[in-house]
Amino acid sequence: MNQIKKFFKFEERGASFRAEIIGGIVTFLAMSYILVVNPGIASGLWSGEAGIPYGGVFFATVVGAFIATMVMALLANLPIGLAPGMGVNAFFVGVIIGQYGYTWQEALALSFIGGLLFLLISLTPLRRTLIQAIPQDLKAAIGVGIGFFIAFVGLRLSGVFVWNGQLQLGDLTSPSVLLGLFSVVLIFIVHSVKHGISKFSFIISIVVTALVGLLLGQLGVQNMPSFGEFNYDAFADIPNVAFVGVFEGFKTVFTQPIFTTLFLVFALLFVDIFDTAGTLVAVGKSAGLEDSEGNIPNLDKALLADSIGTLVSSTLGTPEITSYVESTTGVEAGAKTGFSSVVVALLFLLSLALFPIFNIFTHSSVTLGALVLVGVLMSQQLKEIDWSNMTSAITAFVVIVGMIFTSSIADGIAFGFIIYTLIKLVRGEYKDVHPIIYGSSVLFVVYFILTANLI
């Protein structure tokens, strides 16, 4: 035990086994929806596209998340879980395969190339400079934006808000919506209690809501959390996907139009880098791991772990892996070290055999309270933004609104970089802008131009 504490620097970070284990469990439960969602999207099951065979992508999701999260734990010692990225999986099937006509094997090859480029960047000084170049006000805005984004996504997925040509309230008489609202009220109450029980607000909210939903489901209430069924015969797809898929993809991917191929690789690389950057900033600030200069420890190793994760996921048969901002739920529950990530990794591996049980926690209403409270806690970083400075105020506003309205962390950061650079140039303060920010802003503009014109 002492060796584990020493390795993960428990004493330096004020960590304890109880808090790390609880934090790891909470992070996993907040991420567990990916066990259902990624195979559903990446296989084309929900869109009708010819995606990766379901059994193969489920296996890749579980094993890829396990390996990547374990690398993050042992290499970077950060409380961050990793899994296939949301949004990327839809881009993978809907755009790369559906729109441009690449096979799923070729799409995996593109993801692998993007991961390889990310790995090369992670091995250069650019890795740390990239995030250190972001001004402190912009870092705080990224954290706030991610907090609002998480809460907003949770509210939409659970049906509290719906999109019918415009954003509006969902059906507040729906049992599943009411269950989600119950989880929000419950976590607010528990977290507000002045006694020690508030430390367990996340796990209490998730478990109690799941049990209430399970009970209501047994009583005949529709759309409640339930034990899932997994057809283990689907694992027959694994030999045709893992390792084989990306290898077959490399045989033909370079016969596709070179400009389109380069653009798609850049798009995948762009999303991976800046989703990761935003998550590392948000989680690092929430965990109080920043040093006196606002830098996060082992940042270079965290980026390396993320890039390794993408290489692993592409090889196994699923779109690129990224750091999950849901890790902030575990951090708020007490996680401070990579030991919590070990817990997350092991739970992912365990889910391979116990998926029907873990399926209870994939219901959006079960984790809604946790996601909303994270939004509340992360919004406290608003006080770190200098609102009296119009450059900071405008940039922060653009980042926060951009993340929410585009449902993309990377796009929100991109808009913020571009606006920040323009304002600094107009004010004649061009020397205050780091070259990395200049270069990134130009690349972001090119990215938006290319995506808007769809090549």
Image (spheres, rainbow, N blue to C red):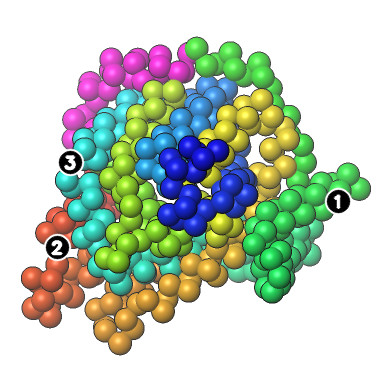
The outermost residue toward the front is 2
319 relative to 430 in the view: left or right: right
Q: Look at the numbered discs 3 and 2 and tell me whether their residues touch, using CB distance below 8 Å.
A: no
Residue 216 has which mark? 1
Q: Is residue 148 above or below residue 131?
A: below
Secondary structure at badge 2 equals loop
Pick the front one: 290 or 83:
290
The outermost residue toward the right is 219
Q: In this view, does 147 lie above or below 318?
A: below
Crowding at mark 3 (Cα within 10 Å: few <14, some 14-19, many 20+):
few
Residue at 71 percent of width and 70 percent of height: 195
In front of the other: label 3 or label 1? 3
Secondary structure at badge 3 equals loop
Crowding at mark 1 (Cα within 10 Å: few <14, some 14-19, many 20+):
some
The C terminus appears in which quarter of the rendering? top left
279 relative to 206 in the view: left or right: left
Instruction: Give the alpha-carbon distance from disc 1 to disc 2, as whole Å.
Output: 55 Å
- Asked if residue 112 lies in the magenta stretch, the reply is no
Kind of residue at badge 2: His
Please give the range of residues in magenta: 240-263
Pick the front one: 58 or 282:
282
379 relative to 210 in the view: left or right: left
Q: Look at the numbered discs 3 and 1 and tell me whether their residues touch, using CB distance below 8 Å.
A: no
Q: In which quarter of the image is residue 272?
A: top left
Instruction: Give the alpha-carbon distance from disc 3 to disc 2, as whole Å.
Output: 17 Å
Kind of residue at badge 3: Thr
Quickly name the residue at label 2: 434
Secondary structure at badge 1 equals helix
Quickly name the residue at label 3: 124
